[in-house]
Image: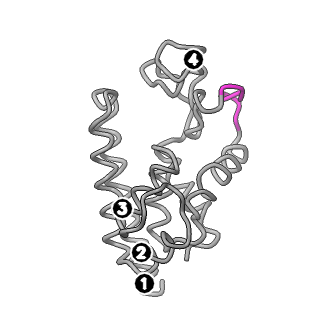
Amino acid sequence: MAIGNLLSCLTFTLKYEGGYSNDPNDRGNWTGQNVGVGILKGTKYGIAAHAYPHLDIKNLTFDDAKSIYETDCWKPIRGDSLPYGVDLATFDAGVMSGPRRAVRWLQAAVGAKQDGLAGSETLGKTLAADGRETIRAICASRRGFVQSLSSNKYFGRGWSRRIAEVEGKSIAVSLMRRAGR
């Protein structure tokens, strides 16, 4: 299990979420949750104005972001209880598309009830499953989802590259942990 692996997963994910951005085509950058609605405050460390309209996004610190991710994503996906590699694939999916959706993709991958809550059935089936296959299935679900979004025309290439890189890194971590490294 990936106990204490939040920082490693977050560091990898922030390669894609990283710095400050206020692209007006990204609905997440607007406090009103849609392009042109509310105030264009932007996104930093992947913390978006639409989800946190009262935060000073531009001046957000790494520690602030880590605390938000731990509370809002890592704990809901039960990251400390997932196998290494599966934790990264699920966490990154949760950061990009929400933790409940990420857990549903995990549940679909392992044959658990798809309720978006990482409970004992989900964890048991995840631990019994082949980690590499679980990772591949999560990433396939992510690819299908982002391709269905209207904003895919703006961000699709970057999203596809990110998902492919997360899949590769997650599988590599899973294999290394399995080999005892």
- Label annotation for residue 108: 3
**Model colouring:** one colour
Labels 3, 4: front one = 3
Gap in Å between the C-alphas at discs 1 and 3? 23 Å
Q: Which residues are magenta?
A: 53-60
Which sits earlier in the primary sequence, circle 1 or circle 3? Answer: 3
Numbered disc 3: secondary structure: helix
Question: From the viewer's perspective, is residue 180 above or below residue 39?
Answer: below
153 is within the stretch colored magenta? no
Q: Which residue is mark 4?
A: 40
**In contact (CB < 8 Å): disc 2 and disc 3:** no
Numbered disc 1: secondary structure: helix
Gap in Å between the C-alphas at discs 1 and 4? 45 Å
Gap in Å between the C-alphas at discs 2 and 3? 19 Å
Q: Mark 4: which amino acid?
A: Leu
Q: Mark 3: which amino acid?
A: Ala
